[in-house]
Amino acid sequence: MSQIVYQSDFGWVLRPHLYTLGDAWHWPASAFDVLAPYTARTKQHVSKALPVEQGDAGVDAPNVRKRKRSKQVKSDHVNKQNGINELHSSICHWLSEAHASLVLHSGTFPLPTTAAVADTSSGASIDDLDFIKFRELADIADSSKHALESEETDQACGIVPVDDVSRELDISSLYHQFISNDSDECKTLPVLGHSFIVPPHSVFLMSDLSQAQLLRSLNPFDFILMDPPWPNKSVRRAGKYQEIDIYDLFRLPLKHLIKPGGCLAVWVTNKPKYQRFVRDKLFSACGLAYVAEWYWLKVTLKGEWVVDLDSLHRKPYEVLIIGRAQHASNSHPDPVASLPTRRAICSVPSKHHSRKPLLDDAIAPFLPRDAQKLEIFARNLLPGWTSWGNEVLRFNDVQYLTQTTEGYLAPPPTELG
């Protein structure tokens, strides 16, 4: 079933719970029930960088030096904020028009609510399920597994059918090898008391940037989606994910992984610095031309922005920057050539931190039939996709999923014997 419930020249309205992994498995509507805009934080955050006024005529030398450094920090912050505001001003009018088209004029909103779900519009995290902490397991795997070849050396890496994965699983054997489900039905993968749904025709590699060269053993893809863990102070304080240095992205063999005419789509924060990095440096290093920017409009079930569009502290949208490799030949149809340069994806965000919209239904008309698709830094598996990341199974834990079709329970997925 398609997630698209409305579309216009501006883009699409998506309902992510309509996306099925196969065998009626899907993420429940209750995971996307944001009933009201996120409330403002009641605490006033006072920057540690601001100088403390002593009120004394005499100030010792260390405090003087601290005050000078603080002024520089404050100046840098103002400059960064001005850059964000300038970028926002350049797209604000279009975003307002897109919101009006997809929300106010569509007749789609308000969306139905899920009766059993409490209002979590404050934005508080509900990531309290007893899921496996894959970041910690990645470290265990690195220490327990035999030393691999140098990452500068091309490595052959076989693909293991999910049926061949033993129930008595040494957790380290999940790492640094491709595991696939080539069947037409879901499989369950039991790991340490948890069950994970592996969708049909999917492949995954659970690994991190230290083993990024394992990706070289894959054939190139028509479409690559990437959501890097960009440096972010608030996320760093909360410890929600492990950040990377932005230049670590050059360790990924992206140029090798993209077919001629293929696309790389990168989710980027609203910081101009990171957007310029993607367009001017990352795409250039991969031989890609910048072709499009799509925007995710985050709204409540009533269609309201989750925060005010002109908020200085937080924006209710994120940007997807798309680059394209040069086509080897113009002798056959090229659906990617019609990729719109600007579109909006309007949806209610997940309650779980940093989950992005599922793009299959929106991107499909602009890709070749039976396109090969790869997600980098993935935190879930999708049918027909290859997924890579150190938390790649996370949201395929059955605790995050539901299995229903037309109001009744579907048969369970195939279990591994």
Image: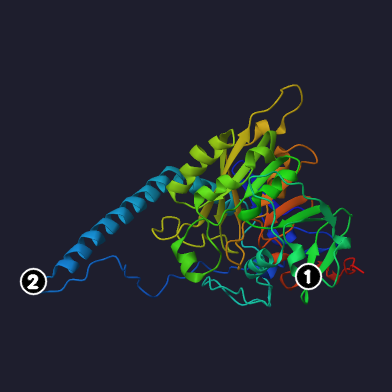
Residue drawn 55% across the image and 63% down it: 242
Q: Are marks 2 and 1 in contact (CB under 8 Å)?
A: no
Residue 384 percent coordinates (x, y): 79, 50
Mark 2 sits on what residue? Answer: 58
Q: Amino acid at mark 1?
A: Asp
Q: Please tell me whether residue 209 is drawn above or below residue 322 in the rendered image.
A: below
What residue occupies the far right of the structure in this picture?
417
Q: Amino acid at mark 2?
A: Gly
Count of numbered marks: 2
Residue 311 percent coordinates (x, y): 41, 59
Pointer 2 or 1: first along the chain: 2
Left or right of 374, for residue 240: left
Residue 303 percent coordinates (x, y): 57, 60
Asked where in the image residue 148 lies, by quadrant, the reply is bottom right
Residue nearest the observer in this picture, 407 or 282: 282
Circle nearer the viewer, 2 or 1: 1
Mark 1 sits on what residue? Answer: 170
Left or right of 410, for residue 255: left
Q: How far is disc 2 from disc 1 in space, using C-alphas?
A: 65 Å
The reply to whether residue 78 is visible in this rendering is yes
What residue occupies the far top of the structure in this picture?
331
Left or right of 241, for residue 408: right
Residue 115 percent coordinates (x, y): 68, 75
Residue nearest the observer in this picture, 142 or 64: 142
Asked where in the image residue 291 lies, by quadrant, the reply is top right
